[in-house]
Image (cartoon, rainbow, N blue to C red):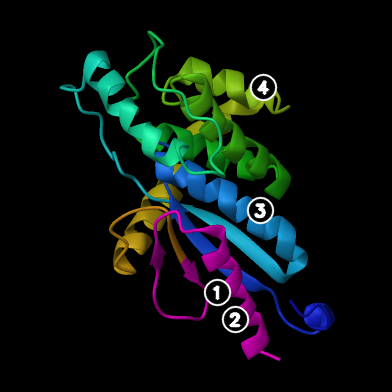
């Protein structure tokens, strides 16, 4: 991989539509984090909201949810997967996708580093620790765990953040996103859907950077 163009080429910007309740998004986030670390300032990743469960489903029971989480074994079987644990908690079932997105957006008001900490913490708490990330008490605890002040948790109730979440979801639909994770490269047509192998992301970014030399 050529390194000499690092200072003369504008960074490639990836826009990722994702849902905190999606196991493949957790795998995709793990891979994209590694890609970002490899390319450094040459790549920017922006996470945007997609709502797999936009509204609560009163028919969803804890028993059904526990059975569903056995499907997490598929992404967990990938050799580079983070820790997944089928649900053995009495918490839940999770209600809908919006609450964790609101908390992530609220953390982002404190800067990129706070968002990154919350983004990772939400995914790990849900898929690796069996914590219901739609529960206000759990979300408040995670907020404090990443070092944010308890009194600032109220930011997640800002109606402007809800509008932002909904607008990003609608934007994804406009880009023909039907599943997540979905990644598009700013300035280019098309969307890459699914938690793709890390090598695919690497080749994609390499080609984009070299095409601008």
The verdict on residue 8 being magenta is: no
Q: Earlier in the sequence, mark 4 or mark 3?
A: 3
Question: In what element is the residue under mark 1?
Answer: helix
Please determine whether, in this image, residue 129 is positioned above or below residue 84: above
Question: In what element is the residue under mark 2?
Answer: helix
For marks 2 and 1, give the CA distance. 6 Å
Q: Earlier in the sequence, mark 4 or mark 1?
A: 4
Numbered mark located on residue 34 in the image = 3
The residue nearer to you, when weighing 9 against 154, is 9
**Residue wearing tag 1:** 204
Span highlighted in magenta in the image: 184-213
Q: Position of residue 143 (x, y in %)?
A: 62, 26
Callouts 1 and 3 close, C-beta under 8 Å: no
**Residue wearing tag 2:** 208
Callouts 4 and 2 close, C-beta under 8 Å: no
For marks 1 and 3, give the CA distance. 14 Å
What residue sits 46% from the left and 40% below the top? 101
Q: Earlier in the sequence, mark 2 or mark 3?
A: 3
What residue sits 64% from the left and 77% below the top? 206
């Amino acid at each position: 991989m050529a390194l000499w163009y690092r200072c003369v080429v504008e960074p490639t910007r990836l826009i990722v539509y994702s849902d905190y309740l999606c196991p493949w998004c957790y795998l995709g986030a793990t891979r994209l984090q590694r890609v970002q670390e490899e390319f450094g300032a040459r790549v920017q990743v922006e996470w945007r909201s997609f709502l797999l469960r936009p509204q609560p489903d009163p028919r969803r029971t804890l028993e059904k949810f526990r059975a569903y989480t056995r499907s997490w074994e598929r992404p967990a079987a990938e050799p580079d997967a983070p820790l997944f644990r089928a649900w053995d908690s009495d918490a839940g079932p999770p209600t809908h996708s919006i609450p964790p997105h609101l908390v992530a957006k609220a953390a982002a008001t404190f800067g990129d580093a706070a968002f990154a900490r919350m983004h990772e913490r939400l995914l790990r708490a849900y898929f690796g620790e069996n914590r219901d990330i739609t529960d206000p008490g759990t979300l408040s605890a995670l907020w404090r765990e990443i070092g944010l002040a308890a009194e600032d948790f109220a930011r997640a109730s800002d109606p402007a953040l809800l509008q932002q979440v909904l607008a990003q979801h609608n934007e994804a639909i406009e880009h023909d996103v039907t599943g997540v994770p979905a990644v598009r490269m700013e300035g280019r047509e098309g969307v890459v859907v699914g938690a793709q192998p890390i090598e695919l992301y690497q080749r994609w970014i390499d080609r984009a950077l070299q095409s601008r030399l």
